[in-house]
Image (cartoon, grey):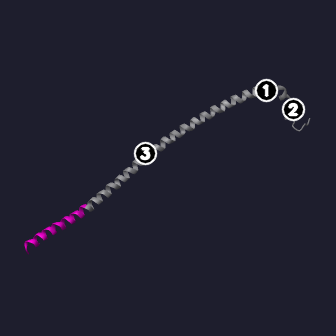
Amino acid sequence: MNVWEAIFAAVLSNAAVLAVLGLLAKALLDKLIARDSKRFEIELAGKANEAIEKIKSELQVQASQTVEKFKSDLQLQAMEHQVRFSRLQKATRKRFPKAIGAIAPVIANPEGRT
């Protein structure tokens, strides 16, 4: 074996060892990255679910407050209408007693029976 063959054999054997070590390192890193990414995915999903639940509860509180506000507004408007129409009825009874007196018998006996 001459010098060139010895150098060539040494370089090839070192290259082969480095190639094998590189493949092993790549496989190890792939496994570590896959494990870490799975753990990160699970952690991220947990945080997302927590955020969703928090937003959901905030929206439920906001919705119930809005519903209560609408209920109170509706009750206030109903009260205003009741007062307005009761005043209107009183004014009508006060201004038109003869008309009401004339209409009352017709309403009581619509077919004209006596």
Q: Decide which of 13, 49 is in the foreground and name it.
A: 13
Q: CA distance from mark 2 to mark 3?
A: 70 Å
Q: Decide which of 63, 26 is in the foreground and name it.
A: 26
Whether the magenta-drawn stretch holds residue 16 is answered as yes
Depicted 107 relative to depicted 8: above or below: above
Quadrant position of the N terminus in the picture: bottom left
Mark 1, Cα crowd under 10 Å, few <14 / some 14-19 / many 20+, is some
- Disc 1, SS: helix
Residue 48 position, x and y percent, is 41, 48
Q: Are marks 3 and 1 in contact (CB under 8 Å)?
A: no
Q: CA distance from mark 2 to mark 1?
A: 16 Å
Whether the magenta-drawn stretch holds residue 95 is answered as no
Residue at 87% from the left image edge and 32% from the top image edge: 105
- Disc 3, SS: helix
Q: Is residue 34 left or right of residue 71?
A: left
Depicted 101 relative to depicted 19: above or below: above
Find residue 105 and name its label. 2
Residue 45 position, x and y percent, is 40, 51
First in sequence: mark 2 or mark 1? 1
Task: Identify which amino acid the numbered label 3 is placed on.
Answer: Ala
**Which residue is the site of mark 3?**
51
First in sequence: mark 3 or mark 1? 3
- Look at discs 2 and 1 and give the one toward the viewer: 1
Task: Identify which amino acid the numbered label 1 is placed on.
Answer: Arg
Residue 20 position, x and y percent, is 21, 66
**What's the magenta region?**
1-25
Q: Residue lying at the far top in this picture: please name it.
A: 94
**Which residue is the site of mark 1?**
93
Residue 6 position, x and y percent, is 10, 71
